Amino acid sequence: MNRKAKLLVGGVGIVVLLSVLAVTTMGSAAEYVEPTDLAEDEAYEGQYVQLEGLALDVEDDEVISFEVVDENHSVSVTYDGEMPETMSDGRFVVAEGQFDGDAVDADDLSVRAHEGEHPDGAEDEEYEDGGYEGEEYEDGSYGDGSEHESPFES
């Protein structure tokens, strides 16, 4: 093979590899955010995000809907796909999709392995199916008037 042919093949190979790299990294370019980030920064509106947090109020109807919560805020998520096998209230999830300013319309949903699986006190009455019930107030009490350990504290 002469020098020009080798240069041409090498150049085409480099262009193909760079194209593959650009396409595969576009999906992972979305920033990981928590509900507080979305609530406190309007710059995320209309952006593709990877929302992570605890899933609560999981409903599996025609479209899967749930709330993703952190220590301060919650964001509604809808997902028109198959329910992940390990998806349930109290599990740590990542929902990838478009944030419209109020909710995330996810096109990919994953459940983090072993995170949120058995929160401390899961057998106690403040937990139901691994999730926590009620709103926690500054004094450590929940909306039901009792005091419980927060699922967010380690």
Image (cartoon, helix red, strand yellow):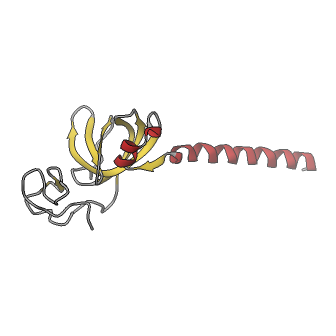
How many numbered tags mark residues here? 0
**As drawn, is 11 to the left or to the right of 150?**
right
> Where in the figure is residue 93, as x and y percent of width and height?
33, 51
Q: In this rendering, does residue 88 appear at all?
A: yes
**As drawn, is 11 to the left or to the right of 54?**
right
Task: Please tell me which residue lies in front, 76 or 139.
Answer: 139
Residue at 88% in and 45% down: 5
Task: Please tell me which residue lies in front, 58 or 4.
Answer: 58
- Residue 137 lies, with reference to residue 57, above or below; the image says below
Task: Please tell me which residue lies in front, 60 or 32.
Answer: 32
> Where in the figure is residue 40, as x and y percent of width and height?
39, 44
The image quarter containing residue 78 is top left
Q: Quadrant of the C terminus?
A: bottom left
The image quarter containing residue 145 is bottom left
The image quarter containing residue 76 is top left
Q: In this rendering, does residue 94 appear at all?
A: no
- Residue 101 lies, with reference to residue 72, above or below; the image says above
Task: Please tell me which residue lies in front, 84 or 69.
Answer: 69
**As drawn, is 35 to the left or to the right of 137?**
right
> Where in the figure is residue 139, as x and y percent of width and height?
16, 59
Residue at 21% in and 50% down: 89
> Where in the figure is residue 34, as x and y percent of width and height?
37, 50
Residue at 34% in and 47% down: 35
Residue at 37% in and 38% down: 106
Residue found at the far front of this picture: 139
